[in-house]
Amino acid sequence: MKSQIILFLTILLTFIYCQDDIPLQEYEIKHIEVMRNNSAECTLFLKKDSSFPLKEPGKIVLVGAGARGTTKGGTGSGDVESRYFTTCEQGLEKAGFEIVSKDWLDKFPEFKKARHQDFVEYIKRIAEKYSSSAGHINFGAVEPEREYDLPLEYSDAVAAFYVIARNSGEGEDRRIVKGDIYLTNSEIRDILYLNEKYEKFMLVLNVAGVVDLSPVKDVKNILLLSQLGVVTGDIFADIVLGKANPSGKLSDTWAAVKDYRYIEEFGGIDNTRYLEGVYVGYRFFDSVNVEPLFPFGYGLSYTEFKVEYSGIKNNRDVFTIKVKVTNEGEFEGKEVVQIYLSPSQENKDKPYQSLVAFKKTPLLKPKESTELNLTFKLSDSARFDEETAQYILDRGQYIIRLGKSSRHTTEVAYITLPEDVVTEVLKNIEGKPDFKDFKPKVKYDYDLSDLEEIILEKKDFDKKRVDYNSYKISFNQKLMSFTNAELARVCLGDFTNTKEEKIGAHLQGQAGETVLHLDKIDKYLVLADGPAGLRIVKKYGIDEKGVYRLCENTWALNNRDFYSDEDWKNVDTLENNLGRNGTVYYQYATAIPTGTSLAQSFNEELVETMGNVVGNEMDIFKVNIWLAPGINIHRNIQNGRNFEYYSEDPLLSGKMAAAMTRGVQKHKNRATTIKHFACNNQEMDRFNDNSIVSERALRELYLRGFKIAVQESNPIALMTSYNLLNGKHTSERRDLLIDILRIEWGFEGLIMSDWFNSNDIKIGLANHPNQHIVSNILGGNNLKMWGSKTDYDLVLKSIQDGNISTMNLLECAYKVYATIELLNQ
Ligand code: BGC
């Protein structure tokens, strides 16, 4: 029966989507099914009344930029070339709805087209301002939505939907303008109108990140659909019909723009000072007591849950909270239970609360209950004291809160520490900011009466003292026979591809590979991007002239306005290659939900399942290293790559990355790469901006997700970031890469740089130098991607000049070689 269903689905989907193509393969069907069965967990309602779900499909009004122009995920290297994906319009039509607003959908794109030239001029102006090229500035730039005016008079519809779409990607940050983070006047007008006119109205957010919803926050229903890859429109239809119940929670605080911004510096072109210290996201909103529109951890579904505290146990400083969850509504669904920890006033300068544990229930039928155990370790909440380079738990009370979001919690118990406890003794990293971190001037009030108290003493904690002399460079006998020139080649991504191999020597669309054509090494690693699936070229041809694309080259297409017609003819695009008659090859990978969408599931098992799908496809296409997941925290809602990353919270980010890594790495010879290490929190001048961060904020927020991922899932690779950190590129910082990553956390994998060569461009004003291959090697960055002849020559010259030694090369080459061996078994 199951195989018959699969066969039927194959024929149906092949007919709908790919009449010119090979049929959907069995793995694609299976993977799409996994997406269909799981992705609603990544969505949530921000507002909800009882008008949905609809009992059956009928006539509906469907409008808004995302109705037909649905986004499945962001742009740039985080984009995945999925064979197809369902738009909201397609999803609803497949489900049997009749859309009465087709004329609106047909006319809507005209308004954006009419203003397109303004956008092109804007890009050119920016390029001129920064003495850069328009192509470089336009890389990742997304045109904002425009004002429009179209009639909305439809009779006979049972419900109306307005779908907002926003997108962003690598190379450019989102802007605080109407049509990006703000809604356009036209969007506000039509959303409010439809909300008034139709009893059943839903605002749908098909977005890469936060949009300021202040003007429309009171509409009856708001669904955060997010970007769900291949099944985006199908999941929308499933939710509308109640075939799926959203069970996600916000992985970020959604607030009005004005409320985020008063302490933050963002988008600097030389230096960006992280003035807010540890007060990012809800840590800020809760501590200064500003009410967000929708808090971190918040989300509604078609059902209601009762969450009851049923007890606490501890073994020294490890606490387990027992919680009973009951589905009190009419729909089956899942709930996310969250535990926050609030230090009492006596504790110095700590955020009002931080998430210390979360867990999702299994699917609960109406009236069904389950018991969950949530565990956290108190020492993980210690404050990093910069003066002494120690993690300290200040004496006082730590209140445990149980809730369904950061703003819907109740105190259930508290821990008392009679004296300060040092939990870890470390050493400081180099470089200090020229400012003192923001400190809120708010008093937190707690009522601890009637709560259970647990008193801990010093002996309940382990004190870890890190021995920085314990680091030993590993060597491999085989590498001892390599010349310096050969070692230099091993430390660089391969740069010897011939013209015929232009999209990648072993896999079309891969991001890079390790050294090829070196007699002493006969194996190599293929690296390909993510995180929303496997980024490879989905269809290409090979003829006597070489390899060519038979699918859109999205980057080139986005830059079409900046090519002359003459130059455009030579670009490798579908349009230019249609006349070629070579052999055609297909590499269809599945677009999974974006990082932020996955984090909204708060479901580690689900994310592991998604990782398994990626791992399967890595097996099929023989990719060794997946350049994902990204764990940079959402410091600012403008970051153009937030959609690739998980959350403003480091615990959630780290747990998600660990789950993803487990899913991928259960496949032999397959590895993840956690990236971008660290403080790569903006795209503006991403190659040379200097993130200036206090060591406390660095350790407590920006490094914490990486640490969790390393310690809980052992990722085989890590990618350093482009930016500088307190004056030095991260790929050149031995304190970050060796002292913290390898010695403090025990990371044994491969450290690679982000894709950059020593001679790559600098954006206009940036005064900081580019990363340099020699400093990378000295800093402990093992593999410089993507590798270039210039870098190779620079290494050889600096050996001659005595700036690096064979020993330095051996240290890096060993990790590259060991990883090649490890992933080629
Ligand atoms: C991005 C990385 C990506 C690499 C390879 C860089 O531009 O920052 O995230 O993995 O390209 O495509």
Image (cartoon, grey):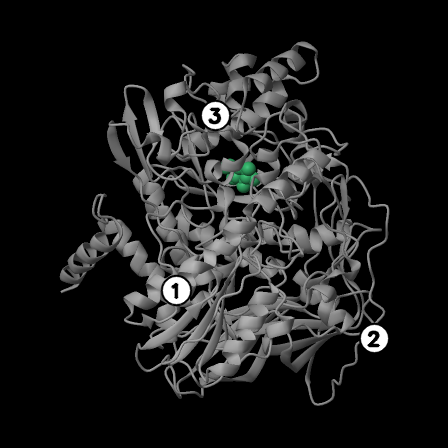
Q: Amino acid at mark 3?
A: Asp
How far across and how far down the image is residue 520, in percent?
Answer: 42, 16
How far across and how far down the image is residue 604, in percent?
Answer: 46, 62
Q: Is residue 399 visible?
A: yes
List the residue tagged with mark 2: 443
Q: Amino acid at mark 1?
A: Asp
Mark positioned earlier in the residue sequence (3 or 1)? 1
Task: Say what secondary structure mark 1 lies in.
Answer: helix
Does residue 346 sit above or below 624 in this rendering?
below
Which of these two is toward me, 209 or 315?
A: 209
Q: Nearer the viewer, mark 1 or mark 2?
A: 1
List the residue tagged with mark 1: 103
Left or right, 701 with reference to 782 = right
Task: Look at the image and tell me in which quarter the C terminus lies.
Answer: top left
The residue at 36%/21% (across/down) is 500
The residue at 36%/77% (across/down) is 242
How far across and how far down the image is residue 511, in percent?
Answer: 46, 34
Mark positioned earlier in the residue sequence (1 or 2)? 1
Alpha carbon of mark 1 to alpha carbon of mark 2: how far? 56 Å
Alpha carbon of mark 3 to alpha carbon of mark 1: how far? 37 Å
List the residue tagged with mark 3: 567
Does residue 680 sit above or below 396 in this rendering?
above
Q: Residues within 10 Å of mark 3 (few under 14, many from 20)?
A: few
Which of these two is toward me, 5 or 153?
A: 153
Alpha carbon of mark 2 to alpha carbon of mark 3: how far? 63 Å
Task: Say what secondary structure mark 3 lies in.
Answer: helix
How many marks the image carries: the answer is 3
Does residue 112 sit above or below 332 in this rendering?
above
Task: Say what secondary structure mark 2 lies in.
Answer: loop
Task: Look at the image and tell me in which quarter the N terminus lies.
Answer: bottom left
Q: Amino acid at mark 2?
A: Lys
Q: Answer yes or no: do the residues labelled 2 and 3 have beta carbons within 8 Å?
A: no
